[in-house]
């Protein structure tokens, strides 16, 4: 049980100290991953940025990921085939939802980053952070999108994830650090005493505080 996302971030940072010498970049999934990633970036003296991935929820079950998308010149779409089959979701619905979520990604990019370009990751160790994983669909999309930017290594760091999901994601990342791996897992929030939704204002504040640190080189978007 984690007290809150800050506690989870500090505990994850302690498990990631071996990466400090690799000059890593921390990329957090908004919104809940940002407070976790902020603590890791602070402990490792690493730059912090975000990776904008949007879950495509199943019809009438928006919290259940049917797919996930990352924007870019060629958007990365990852499908959860088990959910798609179970709910009889057709391709037209997924494509329509993908377009809607891509518009939301662009809105959030402007809100969170303004005109600040993303941090360069080519040839560097990238630590991708979220506040927890259930199905892994969203994180899988993020890892595949990162592969296009040719980082030296992709490290996935989360406070909690089921072991079967961790095993399935092992082909997408060079290293996975998941502090808690319960055999049965419902909602991520079960593992936090305080799982209050992270507000946009907190994301903006933490990114601004992180960017006020040492200057780092930046480059193109995904």
Image (cartoon, rainbow, N blue to C red):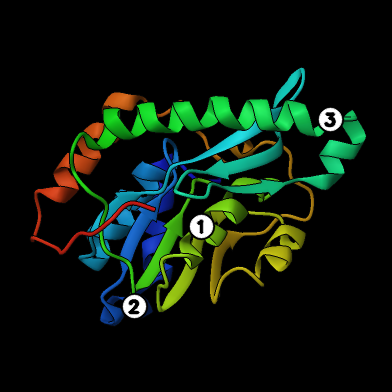
Structural crowding at the residue carrying mark 3, measured as other residues with C-alpha within 10 Å and reported as few (<14), some (14–19) or many (≥20): some
Q: What residue did someone put label 3 on?
A: 89
Q: CA distance from mark 3 to mark 2?
A: 38 Å
- Give left or right: position of 110 versus 167: left
At a point 67% along the width and 49% down the height, the residue shown is 78
Q: What residue did someone put label 1 on?
A: 145
Q: Estimate the x, y position of residue 158 in percent, counting from the top left.
A: 52, 56
Residue 59, above or below 18: above
At a point 77% along the width and 21% down the height, the residue shown is 59
Q: Earlier in the sequence, mark 2 or mark 1?
A: 2
Residue 213, above or below 174: above
Q: Earlier in the sequence, mark 3 or mark 2?
A: 3
Q: CA distance from mark 2 to mark 1?
A: 15 Å
Structural crowding at the residue carrying mark 2, measured as other residues with C-alpha within 10 Å and reported as few (<14), some (14–19) or many (≥20): few
Q: Are marks 3 and 1 in contact (CB under 8 Å)?
A: no
Q: What residue did someone put label 2 on?
A: 123
Q: Estimate the x, y position of residue 146 in percent, counting from the top left.
A: 47, 61
Q: CA distance from mark 3 to mark 1?
A: 24 Å
At a point 74% along the width and 26% down the height, the residue shown is 93
The single residue placed furthest to the top in the displayed view is 60
Q: Estimate the x, y position of residue 117 in percent, counting from the top left.
A: 22, 48
Asked if residue 133 shows in the view, the reply is: no
């Amino acid at each position: 049980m984690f007290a809150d996302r800050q506690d989870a971030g500090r505990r994850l940072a302690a498990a990631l100290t071996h990466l400090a010498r690799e000059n890593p970049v921390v990329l957090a999934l908004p919104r809940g991953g940002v407070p976790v990633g902020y603590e890791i970036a602070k402990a490792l003296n690493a730059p912090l940025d975000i990776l904008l991935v949007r879950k495509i929820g199943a019809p009438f079950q928006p919290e259940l990921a049917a797919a996930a998308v990352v924007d870019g010149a060629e958007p990365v779409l990852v499908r959860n085939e088990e959910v798609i089959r179970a709910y009889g979701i057709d391709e037209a619905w997924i494509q329509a939802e993908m377009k809607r979520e891509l518009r939301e990604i662009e809105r959030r990019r402007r809100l969170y980053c303004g005109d600040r370009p993303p941090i360069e990751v080519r040839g560097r160790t990238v630590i991708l952070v979220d506040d927890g994983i259930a199905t892994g669909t969203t994180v899988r999309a993020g890892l595949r999108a990162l592969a296009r930017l040719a980082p030296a290594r992709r490290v996935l760091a989360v406070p909690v994830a089921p072991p079967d999901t961790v095993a399935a994601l092992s082909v997408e990342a060079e290293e996975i650090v998941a502090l808690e791996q319960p055999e049965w897992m419902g909602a991520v929030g079960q593992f936090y005493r305080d799982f209050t939704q992270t507000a946009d204002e907190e994301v903006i504040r933490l990114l601004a505080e992180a960017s006020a640190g040492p200057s780092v080189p930046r480059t193109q978007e995904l």
